[in-house]
Image (spheres, rainbow, N blue to C red):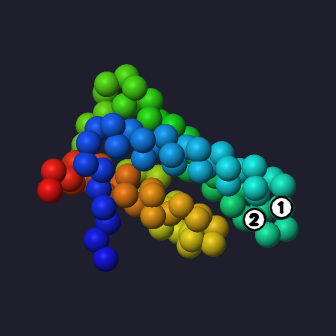
Amino acid sequence: MSIQRARSVEEYVDFVQQALYELEELRVAAEYNLEDLGTSLGFVNELEAGVRQLYRSMEEGSYRFENKDLPFMDIVERYDTDALPFRHLLRQINETHRLGLDAE
């Protein structure tokens, strides 16, 4: 299954903003339901810092596409969709980072 990359800069930025929103939601859910989602708390801070750094570089204009994984992808690959329900979105961001926008 191929991963759908962003087709425009706006869509790519939207992907990153959506990931930040999802991370905040995951943090709130994990704090509320420690028994089931408590394991998520262990990686949310580090993952959120990585996504925020990516977003800041976009805002500052220093972001560059590069054919290598984003630094936070090791965290993404370590957890399944039970712990990281929006894992596919983070993979879309990474795929766009590696291969650029999908001009089709």
Residue 84 percent coordinates (x, y): 59, 64
Name the residue rendered at 47%, 52% in the picture.
72
Q: Are marks 1 and 2 in contact (CB under 8 Å)?
A: yes
Q: What element does badge 2 sit on?
A: helix
Using the image, tell me which numbered label, if any, was put on residue 44.
none
Quadrant containing the N terminus is bottom left
Q: Which residue lies furthest to the left in this view?
A: 104
Q: Horizontally, is 87 left or right of 38 in the view?
A: left
Inspect the image, locate mark 1, and give the three-letter code of the amino acid beneath it: Asn
Q: What element does badge 1 sit on?
A: loop
Name the residue rendered at 59%, 50% in the picture.
22
- Marks 1 and 2 sit apart, C-alpha to C-alpha, by 6 Å
In the displayed structure, 74 sits above or below 52; it is: below
Inspect the image, locate mark 2, and give the three-letter code of the amino acid beneath it: Leu
Residue 100 percent coordinates (x, y): 21, 49
Q: Residue furthest bottom?
A: 1
Can I make out residue 74 in this image?
A: no
Name the residue rendered at 61%, 49% in the picture.
23
Residue placed under numbered mark 1 in the picture: 33
Question: Which residue is more in the foreground, 51 or 2?
Answer: 2
Name the residue rendered at 45%, 64% in the picture.
88
Quadrant containing the C terminus is bottom left
In the displayed structure, 64 sits above or below 73; it is: above
Can I make out residue 85 in this image?
A: yes
Using the image, tell me which numbered label, if any, was put on residue 37.
2
Question: Which residue is more in the foreground, 65 or 88?
Answer: 88
Query: Where, by quadrant of the figure, is residue 58 drawn?
Result: top left
